[in-house]
Amino acid sequence: MTQTALPPLLLIGCGKMGGAMLAGWLELGLPPETVVVEPNAAAVAAFAGRVRHVASIAEIPAGFAPAAIILATKPQEAPNALPALAHLAGPGVVFLSIMAGRTIGGMNAMLGGDARIIRAMPNTPAALRLGFTVACAGPGVTAEQRALSDRLLGAIGEAAWVVEEGLIDPVTAVSGGGPAYVFLLAEVMEQAALAQGLPPDLARRMARATVAGSGALLGASQEDAAQLRRNVTSPKGTTERALAVLMREEAWPALMLEAIEAATARSRELAG
């Protein structure tokens, strides 16, 4: 493996997240020997001629030896898909899973007990190469396999690592579900603008642009979020009055904490 090209990969599932990852990898120099398993031909139409597409695991070419197998299928499909991949498991290949709720131990059991597995949780801004992914390496994963996985995840945004797999549950709650919370903010800001009499088109444009622009400013700034908030808040001004409502003890901070706790608990339930 060089820093200018990737080794052949096996991608299981090419939905929105799998497709976003594949697009990022192609920009890094993904070889055409790469195989994508996806029953929906339309999902891989944009990648025609640049990778090999097969409709099922049974159609993977005999003797194909990928350096990494990326599991981007639905979690509920794991009990069928993973045992069919068990013959590929071993020290020389790393399984990189983005399936929510599937633990390293559970996946290893489905793969025959000799798999090298990395569990990762990306989020939807990956479609714009602005995602944030947190990953955890399981037993036996080599430094080279981790470096390859880090590069694959880095193709869709920023990647970070944790040692304890249990931390993937709050990661799922915060960054995995986080885009939904931000979209909700834009949604309720638009509704509030409408309630104050602003025209619908203006309310929508203003809410979306404000949330998107603020996110861009946050990403570009060296100041933390609290300081950026203070920068907007003039003493005895309109923003201070609004924040006095949002930051009441029973309001936004408490509700966000409760929401993250609920999502974390649900992630643990799904993991069994």
Image: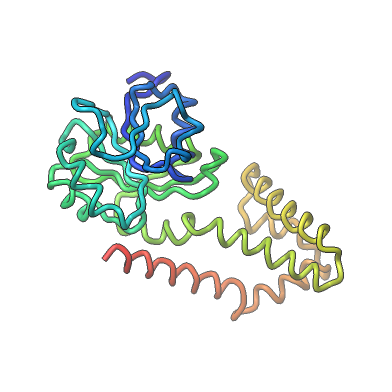
- Quadrant into which the C terminus falls: bottom left
- The residue under the point 32% across, 46% down is 97
- Image position, residue 72 (x, y; %): 37, 45
- Image position, residue 140 (x, y; %): 18, 40
Instruction: Name the side, left or right, on which 105 lies relative to 164.
Output: left
- Quadrant into which the N terminus falls: top left
Q: In this rendered view, identify the residue nearer to me: 244 or 46.
A: 46
Instruction: Name the side, left or right, on which 107 lies relative to 203.
Output: left
- Image position, residue 124 (x, y; %): 52, 49
Instruction: Name the side, left or right, on which 202 lies relative to 133.
Output: right
Q: In this rendered view, identify the residue nearer to me: 267 or 165.
A: 267
Q: How many marks?
A: 0
Q: In this rendered view, identify the residue nearer to me: 40 or 179.
A: 40
- The residue under the point 48% across, 33% down is 45
Q: Quadrant of residue 149?
A: top left
Asked if 117 appears above or below 238 in the picture, the reply is: above
Q: In this rendered view, identify the residue nearer to me: 195 or 221.
A: 195
Q: Report the residue that reaches farthest toward the left.
A: 113
| Image color mode | rainbow
- Image position, residue 224 (x, y; %): 61, 52
- The residue under the point 23% across, 26% down is 64
- The residue under the point 51% across, 32% down is 46
Instruction: Name the side, left or right, on which 17 lies relative to 149.
Output: right
Asked if 214 appears above or below 5 in the picture, the reply is: below
